[in-house]
Image: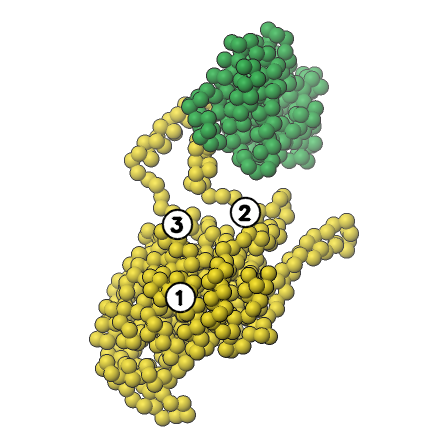
Amino acid sequence: MPRKGILVDRPFERLTREQAELIHQASMQILTDPGLISFNREAVDILHSHGAAVESIAGDHQSWQVKIPEQLVLKALDTAPKTVKLGARNPDNALIMHGDEPRVYLITGSETNIWLDVDFPTYVNKADPTKEIRVPEFKPRRGTIDDLCQSAHVCEHLEMVDGYIRTVNIQDRDITEENKDVNKFFASLNNNTKHFMSGLTSLKQLDNVVRMAELIAGGKKALEDNPIISFITCLVKSPLQFVDDTTETFIEVCRRGLPIVVSSSPQAGTTAPIKEAGIMAQINAEVLAGITLGQLVKPGTPVLYGSVPVRARMDTLGDSYGSVETSQYNIDCVQMARFYRIPNYSTSGVCDSKIPGQQSSIERLFSDMVVTMSGPQYLHCAFGLLDCNSVFCLLQAVLDDTHFKMIEFFLRQPRVDQPELEAMLKQIRDVVATSQKLYIGHIRPVLRSGEISGVYPFEGSGEADDVFELAHERMKELLARPVEHIDRETTARIFEEIPGILPRLNIYESGS
Amino acid sequence: MSKDIIATIKENVIQGRKTQGDVGIDDSLAGTPGVVELLQQALKSNVSPQVIISEGLTAGMQVVGEKFSTKEYFIPDMLASAEAVGAAMDIMKPVLESANVETKGKFAIATVKGDIHDIGKNIVAILLKGAGYEVHDLGIDVPTEKVVEFVKEEKPGYLGLSALLTTTMTEMGVVIKALEENKLRSSVKVLIGGAAVSEEFAQEIGADAYCVNAFDAVKVLEGY
């Protein structure tokens, strides 16, 4: 049985069918005029051999202008699977995504450089030293592989997390460009039995991480049936450019038939038009170009329509994930993916705020709610991420899990049918006939059935705001709860066959 | 037999099952007799009413109170148990009177004149009855004269006054003044509660206590 996710019965949409059609047509025009610039030769050759017009561009870096005809895009949309399965170490954690079904899976990530620790020092009131309060203090530091293990561990136990994208970049002294991939894959897979998606630091490590996944899944065929890992590549640099190295990675992953996200992240105002119609026409063209390339490499490659659009901040021209427009663009992208019936990878919950608090709660809850309501299949909803995706705080991830439980409850379908209404009419008549006229006695049959939403779990006592402290306690509880690690025999084979994994990650040898 | 039935009464109080048809906290007692049926069986078997109260009803409510304080139980659970105990006390009233067993005391409660809100008042009444008090609910929008008359005639040890509105809370002071004028004030402890009132207001009008909620009312009474 795959995970249930959140099925949004009537997804919220901003665009009319006609507007989606107009965006599609505009994207088709963009792909032929001006077309894309590719810095990757192989992509150019593949597209050219299938009818794209190609022209070399003079300059320091070798590049080509590629004009992709509409027919080629439509054919690719035809061969791209409309249902994509993302497997998991625990098969009950598999995700089945149908492009036309708005069932939302909630995913962590993406990668940040900074890990935010939290502590609660006590402060004494100068005017009245008998009064003390504990105030949360957040301390940033560079992320390590131990942090990644902790994050994967806690996310394994967070109820609303359906899949794991690593949340922290591992920057230990013994982590190099060469061994980073095998270590980040192993640390994540060993501490989490949900689906694992990642980008690659070095293409040279692709076969090593695929082999690792085969060993864990039980062989090559088993991995095909239960793809416990998938990849994400930002092959497009906005506006409309195929980057050399990520495009190469993308092509190689497609050749291996593993699921992959075609992701584009234009910034409205700088690398895309500030107006909604403009950024939508462009991002849609960019993603369709990637899907087309992937399907030409290997027809039937499972791809996700990946969208990470964002609006620029007007004060810094940095990303403003907390802006309202960012959510609007994401919702539009969800709708465009559904227009093509390709499962969508969308984004929510990324905030501008640098630490957990009121701003971060408002920014992330707003986008989490509205984007979830639009029904993306794979919602990378930034569990624990702060400061525009540059900081990760485990405490915030615990808070986010709670907030998503509320969203999930909110999106449940109402039960209004004849038997229910008849039962309610009887209840109303019965209660009105009593002297106390209270319905409290009828609460009990549903009190523990899951039909009533719970109290906010981090509510403090009295007037104290204990949210952070209580969430921190919860975080420690989750860390103390064991996870199902990869078994001893498989671990031994992985360490034997895959070079570069740090010995301290072997829990059977290091005793950690 | 006696021990078994007392233990079963206690368990049914904990489960909040007044009668056989009631749902408990779980399905473990579904379809079995509730507190009312068990009590009737116990009385028929000549089990001592004092034992029924102390080892069955009160002991059960004590467990319910503990479960509520640890957040295992919610208010609907507490009220269901209190209602079950209240129904049992109604059945036992004649038995207790003939055996000269005293209740914890007589408690009159009313929503003051001009105010028709009674959710809080009703919950207080259920809980106090469940806690073993003899509760007289005078209703809503109760004129001051009626309250005074009741205190004069029935001599309750306690009087609870409830008001939701800022426009009606002043009636509480009117009632207290009327009790003083009728030389009844010293005979009755006056407790006030409701969304509009406060500790400060209680002191201002000369009430004996302000109860922040129904559970507080039980606590305040147990303190006398």
Q: CA distance from mark 1 to mark 2?
A: 40 Å
**Which chain hosts label 2?**
A
The residue lying at 69 percent from left, 26 percent from top is: B223
The disc at residue A411 is 3
Q: Amino acid at mark 3?
A: Leu
Query: SS for tag 2?
Result: loop
Indicate whether A364 appears above or below A449: below
Co-location on one chain, circles 2 and 3: yes
The residue lying at 44 percent from left, 68 percent from top is: A212
From the image, state the color of chain A. yellow
Query: SS for tag 1?
Result: helix
Would residue A470 be seen by someone viewing this image from the given angle?
A: yes
- Report which residue position mark 2 lands on: A457
Q: Earlier in the sequence, mark 1 or mark 2?
A: 1
The residue lying at 33 percent from left, 34 percent from top is: A421
The crowding category of the residue bearing disc 3, from other C-alpha atoms within 10 Å (few below 14, some 14 to 19, many at least 20), is: some
Q: Amino acid at mark 2?
A: Pro
Indicate whether B167 appears above or below B59: below
Kindly check if marks 3 and 1 are in contact, taking CB atoms under 8 A apart as contact.
Answer: no
Quarter of the image where one finds residue A373: bottom left
Q: Earlier in the sequence, mark 2 or mark 3?
A: 3
Q: Which chain is represented by green in the image?
A: B
Which x, y percent locates residue A112? 52, 69
Which one is in front in this view, the residue at disc 3 or the one at disc 1? 1
The residue lying at 42 percent from left, 40 percent from top is: A451
